[in-house]
Every structure is written in C-alpha cells, then in structure tokens.
Amino acid sequence: MVAQVLFTLANQLSETAYQNVQQARFIYERQQVEKMLIEMKDKAEAANKSKSEFLANMSHEIRTPLNGVLGMLHLLKETSPTSEQRHLLDAAMTSAKRLTRLLSDILDLSKVEAGKLQLVDSRFSISSLRDSILDLFQFPARENHNELDFPLPQELPETLVGDETRLRQILFNLVGNAVKFTQSGRVSIEVDALARRPDSRVQILFTVRDTGIGITDEQLQLIFEPFVQADGSHTRRFQGAGLGLPIVRKLVQLMDGELAIDNTEGSGTTAYLSLPFGIAHEDIADIPKLDMRNQPDGRKFRVLIAEDDQVSMLYGKKTLQRLGHEVSTASNGKEALQRLAEKDFDLVLMDIQMPVMNGMEAAAAIRTSEEIGSNARIPIIAMTAYAMTGDKESFLSAGMNGYIAKPMEASELQAALAKVMSASN
Ligand code: ADP
C-alpha cells in the first residue's frame, strides 16, 4: 500500500517536473524567437535608414550639376536665340525642372522615412495660401479646360499657426493631381473650420474635389505606395512618378491629420484632408512676405557671391550683372571673409556647402568678426540646393537674413534681394 502511494506520488512529481521543464523550454524558445525578431527588425530598420540616407545624398549630389544645367539654359535663352532654338531651350528647361522636382520628392520621402523631417510651425495667412494655389494652377487648369475654384468662407480664421510649407506641399500635390486628371471639368478647393480640439487647436478641413477620370477601388489600394501610378500601362498618358501621394500620406501622419479619398464612381475624385492648426491672435502684417510684385526700385547693390561650384557662380554672377548689380566672387567662406575685409559690400549671397569654410561657419564668422568693420552687419542670403524646411531656420539662426533655394530664377533672386534690402534699411 505504502509502496503504491509512493509510486503514485513519484509519478505525479515527475509529471510536474516534466511540465515545468516543458514550460521552461517553451519560455526559452519564445525568448529566442523574440530576440531573433528584434534583431531582424533592427537590421531592417538599419537597412531602410541607409537606403534613405543614400537617396538623400544622391539626390543632393545630382541637384548641384542639374542646377548648373538649368542656369546655363537660362543664360542661353538671353542670347537672342531663333524661335526654333527658343523652343528647344524651353523643352530642355521643362525636363530639367521636372527632374529637379523629382529629386525634391525623393529627398522628402527619404527624409520622412529616415525620421529626419521636422515640422516647423509659423504663423501664416490662409488667403495668401489660397492665392499661391490659384496662381500656380490657373494656367495648367486652363490648359486642361478646367474651371478652378477656391472660395474662402468668412468665418475662417485668417491667420493660422502650423507648418505652412508642408501644408502647401500637400495641397499642391492634391490640387495638382485633380487638375492633371481632369479634362474639361471642374476642380474646387473648399476650406472649413471644424470643431475646436481640447488642445485649443482648430481642425481645418480641406476638400479637393474634381470631376476627372476617377480612381477605381483596386487602384485606391495601391496609390499610396511609392512609384505606383493607377494608369500602369507602358504608354503612360500622364506625367508623374507616383511619389506625390506617398509623401502626402506621410506628411499628413506627421502633422497629426487625416486624409481620405472618395472615389464614388462616375463623380471624379474627392480628397478630404483634415489637419490641426493653432490660431494666431496677433496680426501678422509684420511678417515680410516674398512678394513678386514688390520689385526693387532700381537701386544697384555691391554683391559678394560665395560659391564653390563654378557653373552656379557664373549663373549667379551673370544674372545679377544683368539686373545691374556689381558682383565680386569668393569660392569659399574664408575667401568671402577676406573680400569683406578688403572693401564694403551691400549684400552677400552665400552657398551652404563649400570646402575650407562652409556657409554656416562663414555667416557666424562674419557676424562676430572685428576685421571687417560695418560689413559685420551685412545682409546675408543663403543659397542652397537643400530646399528643406528646418534648414531655413538653421540658416537664420546662423545669422543669415534670407534664404533662396537653388535653382534660382532671376525673378526670385531679385525678389529676395528686394526683401532683404528693404528689411535692412
Ligand atoms: P503622380 O506623380 O504619378 O501623380 P501620385 O502619387 O500623386 O503620383 O498619384 C498616384 C496615382 O494616383 C496617379 O498616377 C493617378 O493614377 C492616381 N490619382 C491621384 N490623384 C488622382 C485624381 N485626382 N484623379 C484620378 N487619379 C488620381
């Protein structure tokens, strides 16, 4: 009897021990799998990050010579070409500009993916945003025989606080697509202020509605993936690289907003974009804006250009000389400081990436230098192929007064000059 009890007990014990061993093995295996998954995730993230960094570097490296090509084409156009040559030049410029836009998109997408894109909030006027959209899309809308409509309701706050550049980028994409995929129809943009949020921001709803070719349900599943276009045939009817919407989606996520696309059959496409913004209470009249109508009054300036790329330098110099300004050059920041010590200037155009001393270091050195006298307070405009938000703020905090993205159009250069010079007087 006792032997039997002992035997049963021993059996039970060994069963529990067996179960414990089984459980321990299960936990161990699970931990191993978890460890493996974490390692795989880290590796995938690292690979994605290096891909994004590679793309960002490549697009920057390609941009510089491309700016050179665009600049030379601009200059060539000023040399009284025949009408046939002008036509060819226009075609070359259109292609170069398209490539520049594509590079900006790749740079943006890779920056967002690498988690490097930071939002920059500022106060902005909703009616200027509307004007810039109408300005930009009036011509392409007319070309496609579309009506373009963007009414602003009275009750909307005129001044909002948020990342205006990114909002503009999102709307340019949505409105651009609406105009592109609609023929002899109508594109309308509506804005409404939705309810106040608990964090006292206001939710703004933008509705971009078109009567164009529409998107099918299947296409809708794919168009947020990079490089996907709904019209996947080899002879694509519409230009584009399929990068617009993936960037838009990532930006909207980053801005804590929502995007929905309604593709109800037979009625075109409607994009609903809702984003939170702060409300500015002060007047924004004091914020200077780059107004192309605000041309300078024919004053001539002594301009110093610091630029290491010979082609960009030639373009900047010729363009400024044509506008009647006197131009000196320096091929890096250190040389710029030497020029400023030699004579007085009215303005410096400063490239950012330069050998020996880069533009940021040079700007900081100019502001603190004792050898260059009153030139230490000279207005400095940054010129860079990095047309990224966030960078602008760092240029300004390095002591620069303005910012111009390459490739610079002569009119943009003139407007930036006028803006900086009028602010400094
Ligand atoms: P793309 O630069 O090619 O326009 P997007 O990412 O902006 O790239 O759009 C991806 C695809 O989604 C487009 O090629 C098009 O097929 C489809 N699409 C986007 N917007 C519209 C629209 N408003 N109407 C019809 N199709 C659209």
Image (cartoon, rainbow, N blue to C red):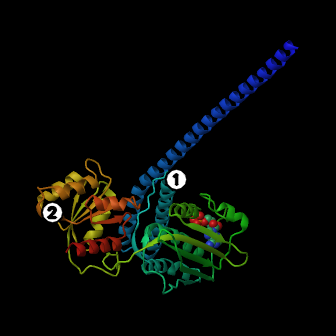
- Left or right of 134? Residue 23 is right
Q: Is residue 378 visible?
A: yes
Q: Establish if 154 lies above or below 254.
A: below
Q: Establish if 382 lies above or below 202.
A: above
Query: Mark 1 falls on what kind of element?
Result: helix
**Amino acid beneath label 1:** Glu
| Outermost residue toward the bottom in this view | 154
Q: Earlier in the sequence, mark 2 or mark 1?
A: 1
- The image position of residue 145, as x and y in percent, is 59, 83
| Outermost residue toward the top in this view | 3
Find residue 393 and report its image quarter: bottom left
Query: Mark 2 falls on what kind of element?
Result: helix
Q: Is residue 238 visible?
A: no
Viewer-proximal residue among 352 and 300: 352
Find residue 28 and report its image quarter: top right
- The image position of residue 279, as x and y in percent, is 43, 74
- Displayed-image quarter of ligand 1: bottom right
Viewer-proximal residue among 311 and 274: 274
> If the image is split into quadrants, where does the N terminus sit?
top right
> If the image is split into quadrants, where does the C terminus sit?
bottom left
Q: Establish if 224 lies above or below 264.
A: above
Q: Residue at x 52, y 63 (%)?
A: 256
- The image position of residue 291, as x and y in percent, is 35, 78
Circle 2 residue: 375
Viewer-proximal residue among 236 and 418: 418
Find residue 159 and report its image quarter: bottom left
Circle 1 residue: 113
Mark 1, ligand 1, within 8 Å: the answer is: no
